[in-house]
Image (cartoon, rainbow, N blue to C red):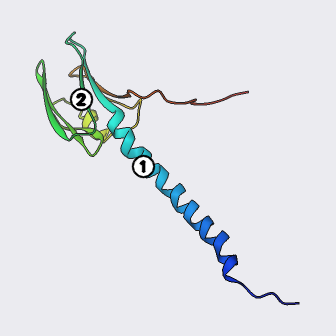
Amino acid sequence: MKKSITPWDAIPAAICILLSGLLLLCPLLSKASAAENSFAVISYRDGRASETYSLSSDREIPIQCGQYSMLILIEDGKVSVAESNCPDGICIKTGKISKIGETLVCAPAGVSVKIVSTVKEGIDAFIG
């Protein structure tokens, strides 16, 4: 006997589509909140106090460290070195960082930028 599709058959399909849409939005929502709770900590080798900047607001941070000058950019929740007169330029070539724990380093200038968060993260890994 052949069964025809009724309007009630569409309800489970619609629920599945809505739930999958919500699951696709979750990573986007968590990235937005991650930028609000993340900070760039700039540390200096010469003993100066570290500086902390929120990733939620765009800014340019000029840095002078000895004979080296740098321009650090915070844009769209990402940090990069836009300009540096260091000899190798690895800090510029590193590109943008945005994930907690990532670090940018300019060794000749003695400057490092690390992404940190005020929110405690869950379990990184479970072995056992």
Q: Position of residue 122 (x, y in %)?
A: 54, 30
Which residue: 54% across, 55% down? Answer: 23
- Answer whether residue 108 is visible to the viewer in this image: yes
Q: Position of residue 101 (x, y in %)?
A: 41, 29
- Farthest front residue in view: 8
Give me the disc on residue 77: none
For marks 1 and 2, give the CA distance: 22 Å
Amino acid at circle 1: Leu
Give me the disc on residue 53: 2
Q: Position of residue 33 (x, y in %)?
A: 38, 41
Which residue: 49% across, 30% down? Answer: 121
**Label 2: few (<14), some (14–19) or many (≥20) C-alpha neighbours in 10 Å:** some
Which residue: 19% across, 30% down? Answer: 87
- Answer whether residue 106 is visible to the viewer in this image: no
Q: Nearer the viewer, mark 1 or mark 2?
A: 1
Point out the tag, 1 or 2, that comes first from the N-terminus: 1
Residue 34 in the image: above or below residue 26 = above
Amino acid at circle 2: Tyr
The residue that mark 1 highlights is 29
Drawn side of residue 73 relative to residue 115, left or right: left
**Viewer-nearest residue: 101 or 30:** 30
> Tag 2, which secondary structure?
strand
The quadrant in which the N terminus is found is bottom right
Q: Position of residue 26 (x, y in %)?
A: 48, 51
Q: Quadrant of residue 72?
A: top left
**Label 1: few (<14), some (14–19) or many (≥20) C-alpha neighbours in 10 Å:** few
**Viewer-nearest residue: 10 or 105:** 10
Q: Quadrant of residue 68?
A: top left
The quadrant in which the C terminus is found is top right
**Viewer-nearest residue: 76 or 72:** 76
Drawn side of residue 102 relative to residue 55, left or right: right
